[in-house]
Image: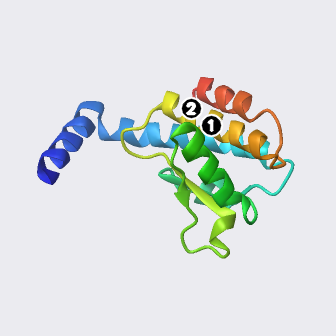
Amino acid sequence: HHLYGLRTALDMIKAEGLDNVFARHEKLAQIIWAAFDQWSKQGPMHLNIADPAHRSHAVTSVGIGSPNGDALRKWCETECGLTLGIGLGRDPADAYFRIGHMGHVNAHMIMGVLGTIDAGLKALGIPHGEGALAAAAAALASRT
């Protein structure tokens, strides 16, 4: 079954075109970063890699202060069915989470992830900047 899955994944990449896959991953990363630029203007949230030129187009790692990472991950999962990644290799681990944005992922999935995170931040009373979803939508609407 793993080989069938791999064959299907490779067929999907071939159909989309490898350059288009890379461009899509880059665009999805930019959408996420635009939201986090807004959220990080107030409160403890920050991206682990400050320089966008050094960030991954596959996953975004976020510091949000202990125990906010685990609290937000738990809220997103139990209230909305969204699984955020744990803070791998971070100390304390409960102060971090990750968002994967590689593979069979598209803009409406990412906007849903960001909307869920925004709701979780509000529900848990975690301080954060406003305007993240509007910034993400503007990044999505831009051509670069």
- Is there any visible trace of residue 82 in the rendered image? yes
Count all numbered tags in the image, as a single digit: 2
Q: Which residue is mark 1?
A: 116
Which quadrant of the rendered structure holds the C terminus? top right
Amino acid type indicated by mark 2: Gly
Q: Give the image location of residue 61, x and y in percent.
A: 60, 58
Above or below residue 72? Residue 86 is below
| Residue 45: mark | none
Q: Residue at x 70, y 38 (%)?
A: 118
The reply to whether callout 2 and callout 1 are in contact (CB within 8 Å) is yes
Cα–Cα gap, marks 2 and 1: 6 Å
Q: Give the image location of residue 64, x and y in percent.
A: 73, 59
Q: Residue at x 78, y 39 (%)?
A: 122
Local secondary structure at mark 1: helix
Amino acid type indicated by mark 1: Thr
Specify whether 119 is left or right of 24.
Answer: right
User: Which of these two is toward me, 20 or 43?
Assistant: 43
Specify whether 127 is left or right of 80.
Answer: right
Above or below residue 66? Residue 140 is above
Mark 2 burial class by Cα count in 10 Å: few <14, some 14-19, many 20+:
few
Q: Give the image location of residue 21, x and y in percent.
A: 37, 39
Above or below residue 29? Residue 15 is above
Specify whether 60 is left or right of 66.
Answer: left
Q: Which residue is mark 2?
A: 112
Q: Which residue occupies the extreme top position in the image?
A: 141
Local secondary structure at mark 2: helix
Q: Quadrant of residue 50?
A: bottom right
Mark 1 burial class by Cα count in 10 Å: few <14, some 14-19, many 20+:
many
User: Which of these two is toward me, 41 or 116?
Assistant: 116
User: Which of these two is toward me, 100 or 142?
Assistant: 100
Q: Give the image location of residue 137, x and y in percent.
A: 65, 26
